[in-house]
Image: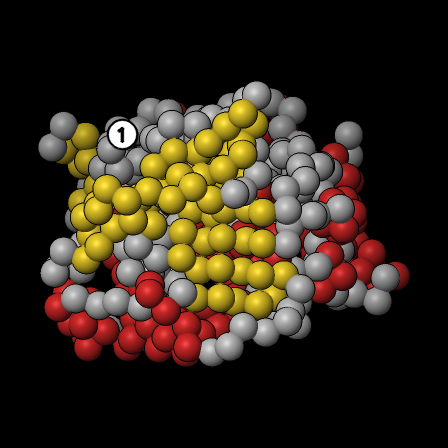
């Protein structure tokens, strides 16, 4: 009797869970069936949703409900707190599974090569996001001494960073932020936040809804300089062909022409300012130098040679995420991705047997969370084609119990889907005691104990 197709997915964020969902919805799920194991280095699942989305975005975090329904399926097992490759290697996975899909995402900061970027007070946005989202592997405190702060970048992560810095701690208290984050934000001195983009309003990567949310806080005054509202032929075409681009531009235009209000925290959105240098004194940030740019006709910009020094005491770069190189897999240094064709890992022009990628580790950190679904569908379709054509390798030990024995013999303290239900209940109980929906547990050992994993 044919056994189910055994698939390991490394990374239990949206990309990995969407891949599992695509497998379960395929013909292979009914004949002869599919058995899926999700591996996640965090004790809890959901990846970017839990550790990369700002806590005041309940609409986006609502995606967890749909992901939860996938993980509830009996054909799926979760192995949390399992690190690739220290706990389980690619060779190990190949011994247990017909195919392996990597969906490890991107959670590091892309570098910005300008003088002074290494100064004390210059930070990566991803590190700050990990702190306020309660990531177990980052420090519990964050220096929030600066009264004037620069954020470099015009994407949604830059907006998240700027908004969290500009809001009061009590505004964020109703969310799931941990206690240490609330205490840290109470000491935040920021009164002016300056967001810088080197191109114009039509080239900003904000989503319209996230941009409008900036103006919803009673404490944040959003300010746009009318001189920054400028379009060339390329910009006009971008607005004409993309509804979201046009909506963002209209919002910025409306803000540029209104009178400045009296909300206590000012959030400035600057365009046509290219970061040239982080200014320092005694090893600490004391300012930011930008070069004024102008449109070149096609939506790109060129420098004008005119520079401005901005009085700021901290700089956050939000210029993109970067994936971590995965051992035993080919790597494209320039893009920070695993080379692939349709989700099939490619090395030396040949497909690496039974090995696939999906999500940001495949295509880079671009697009919204929902865009990952189409990516997963393509990868899974090609995996299933390889299965039908007999191109997958045969694992030595495909029995589901073989994996659990392997992890237990290695002393890996892994969490399960049942353990997530326990952790979820524990966090909700902490929240209920404070009149909140949830309070996130931060420490890894505490997460393991709440998940029912013994020390």
Res. 355 in view: no
Residue nearest the viewer, comparing 15 with 280: 280
**311 or 138, which lies in front?**
311
Q: Nearer the viewer, residue 166 or 126?
A: 166
Query: Can you give x and y, in whole percent of width and height, for residue 448 in the image?
Result: 72, 39
Horizontal side, residue 190 vs residue 284: left or right: right
Q: Residue 218: name its quadrant.
A: bottom right
Q: Taking 418 as reference, is 186 left or right?
A: right
Local crowd size for mark 1, using a 10 Å CA cut-off: few (<14), some (14–19), many (≥20): few
Image vertical order of residue 41 relative to residue 245, above or below: above
- Report if residue 280 is visible in the image: yes
- Residue at x 67%, y 33% (from the top left corner): 139
Residue on which the image places disc 1: 333
Give how far across and how far down residue 330 sits, in percent. Answer: 26, 29
The C terminus, quarter of image: top right
Number of marks in picture: 1
Q: Position of residue 279 (x, y in %)?
A: 46, 31
Residue visible at 37% across and 69% down in the picture? 226
Relative to 61, residue 348 above or below: above
Dividing the picture into quadrants, the one containing residue 380 is bottom left
User: What's the residue at 54%, 25% (across, down)?
Assistant: 281
Q: Secondary structure at mark 1?
A: loop
Percent position of residue 372, x then y: 36, 58
Q: How is the image coloured?
A: secondary structure
For the point 60% across and 37% down, the residue is 81
Indicate left or right for 14 with 448 as reference: left
Image position of 266 with respect to 417: above or below: below
Q: Nearer the viewer, residue 23 or 425?
A: 425
């Amino acid at each position: 009797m044919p056994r189910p197709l055994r698939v390991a997915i490394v990374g239990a964020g949206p990309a990995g869970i969407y891949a599992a969902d695509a497998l379960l919805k395929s013909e292979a799920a009914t004949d002869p069936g599919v058995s899926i194991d999700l591996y996640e280095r965090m004790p809890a699942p959901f990846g970017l949703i839990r550790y990369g989305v700002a806590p005041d975005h309940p609409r986006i975090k609502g995606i967890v409900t749909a992901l939860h329904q996938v993980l509830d399926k009996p054909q799926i097992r979760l192995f949390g707190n399992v690190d690739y490759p220290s706990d389980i290697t690619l060779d190990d996975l190949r011994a247990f599974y017909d195919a392996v899909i990597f969906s490890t995402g991107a959670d590091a900061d892309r570098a910005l090569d300008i003088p002074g970027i290494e100064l004390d007070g210059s930070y990566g946005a991803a590190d700050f996001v990990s702190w306020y989202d309660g990531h177990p592997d980052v420090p519990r405190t964050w220096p929030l001494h600066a009264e004037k702060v620069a954020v470099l970048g015009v994407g949604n992560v830059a907006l998240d960073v700027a908004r969290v810095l500009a809001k009061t701690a009590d505004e964020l208290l109703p969310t799931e932020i941990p206690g240490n984050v609330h205490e840290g934000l109470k000491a935040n001195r920021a009164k002016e936040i300056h967001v810088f983009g080197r191109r114009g309003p039509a080239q900003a990567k904000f989503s319209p809804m996230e941009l409008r949310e900036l103006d919803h806080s009673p404490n944040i005054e959003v300010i746009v300089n009318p001189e920054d509202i400028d379009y060339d032929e390329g910009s006009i075409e971008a607005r004409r062909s993309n509804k979201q681009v046009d909506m963002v531009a209209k919002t910025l235009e409306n803000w540029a022409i209104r009178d400045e209000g009296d909300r206590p925290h000012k959030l400035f959105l600057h365009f046509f300012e290219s970061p040239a240098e982080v200014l320092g004194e005694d090893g600490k940030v004391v300012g930011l130098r930008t070069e004024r740019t102008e449109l070149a006709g096609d939506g790109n910009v060129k420098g004008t040679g005119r520079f401005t020094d901005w009085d700021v005491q901290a700089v956050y770069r939000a210029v993109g995420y970067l994936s971590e190189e995965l051992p035993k897999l080919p790597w494209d240094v320039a893009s920070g991705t695993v080379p692939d064709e349709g989700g099939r890992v490619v090395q030396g022009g040949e497909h690496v047997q039974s090995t696939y990628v999906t999500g940001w580790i495949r295509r880079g950190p671009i697009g919204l969370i929902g865009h990952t679904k189409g990516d997963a569908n393509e990868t899974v379709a090609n995996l299933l084609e390889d299965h039908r054509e007999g191109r997958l390798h045969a694992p030595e030990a495909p029995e589901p119990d073989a994996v659990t024995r392997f992890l237990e013999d290695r002393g890996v303290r892994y969490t399960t889907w049942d353990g997530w239900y326990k952790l979820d209940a524990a966090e909700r109980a902490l929240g209920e005691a404070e009149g909140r929906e949830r309070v996130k547990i931060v420490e890894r050992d505490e997460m393991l104990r709440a998940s029912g994993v013994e020390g």
